[in-house]
Image: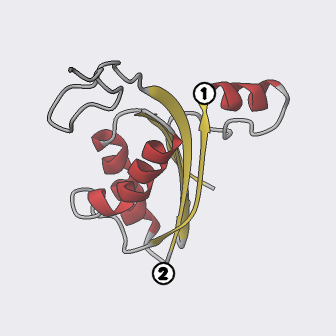
């Protein structure tokens, strides 16, 4: 007797129902020892060039905030990617050895709802790398 195929296929088989990636708005906050502003700006600009969906970054000598869109299946995946971003680009973008001190990930609908309601407005400078 044959068993019906389960919805969860073997790891080696393609899924029976393709999973759709969604867009997530990410705000990543990092902080650490004071870094020369010109060096930090150059590093953040390299990060912006390397990472697609980069929206904007604000920075000061000892902290920065990066806002961007991430494409991922669900919140868990989007957050995991965001938590790896700084470390994975540390060498290629010459980022300072700062730690992640904050993370917010919301779906596209929530982001647009917040903006429409006057909360969570986009930063004053859209796109690029800017000082606070």
Q: Which mark is residue 69?
A: none
| Above or below, 36 relative to 43 | below
Q: Position of residue 16 (x, y in %)?
A: 29, 19
Q: Position of residue 117 (x, y in %)?
A: 85, 28
Which quadrant, please, contains the N terminus?
top left
In the image, 20 versus 50, the foreground residue is: 20
Q: Do we see residue 59 in this rendering?
A: yes
Q: Secondary structure at mark 2?
A: loop
Q: Secondary structure at mark 1?
A: helix
Q: Position of residue 17 (x, y in %)?
A: 35, 18
Q: Which residue is mark 2?
A: 33
Q: Residue at x 26, y 31 (%)?
A: 9
Which quadrant, please, contains the C terminus?
bottom right
- Left or right relative to 46: residue 55: right
- Left or right relative to 21: residue 28: right
| Above or below, 110 relative to 82 | above
Mark whose residue sits in front, 2 or 1 = 1
In the image, 93 versus 22, the foreground residue is: 22
Q: Residue at x 46, y 43 (%)?
A: 78
Q: Farthest residue to the front: give it.
A: 1
Q: Which residue is mark 1?
A: 108
Q: Residue at x 37, y 54 (%)?
A: 85
Q: Farthest residue to the bottom: give it.
A: 33
Q: Do we see residue 60 in this rendering?
A: no
User: What is the CA distance from the residue labelled 2 to the residue labelled 1?
Assistant: 33 Å
């Amino acid at each position: 007797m044959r068993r019906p195929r389960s919805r969860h296929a073997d790891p080696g088989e393609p899924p029976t129902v393709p999973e759709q990636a969604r867009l997530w708005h990410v705000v990543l906050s990092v902080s650490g020892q004071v870094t020369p502003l010109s060096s930090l700006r150059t590093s953040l600009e390299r990060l912006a060039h390397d990472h697609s969906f980069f929206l904007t970054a604000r920075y000061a000598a000892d902290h920065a905030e990066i806002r961007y869109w991430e494409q991922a299946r669900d919140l868990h995946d989007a957050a995991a990617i965001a938590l790896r971003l700084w470390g994975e680009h540390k060498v290629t973008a010459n980022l300072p050895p700062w730690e992640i001190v904050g993370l917010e990930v919301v779906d596209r609908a929530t982001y647009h709802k917040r903006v429409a309601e006057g909360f969570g407005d986009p930063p004053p400078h859209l796109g690029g790398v800017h000082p606070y």
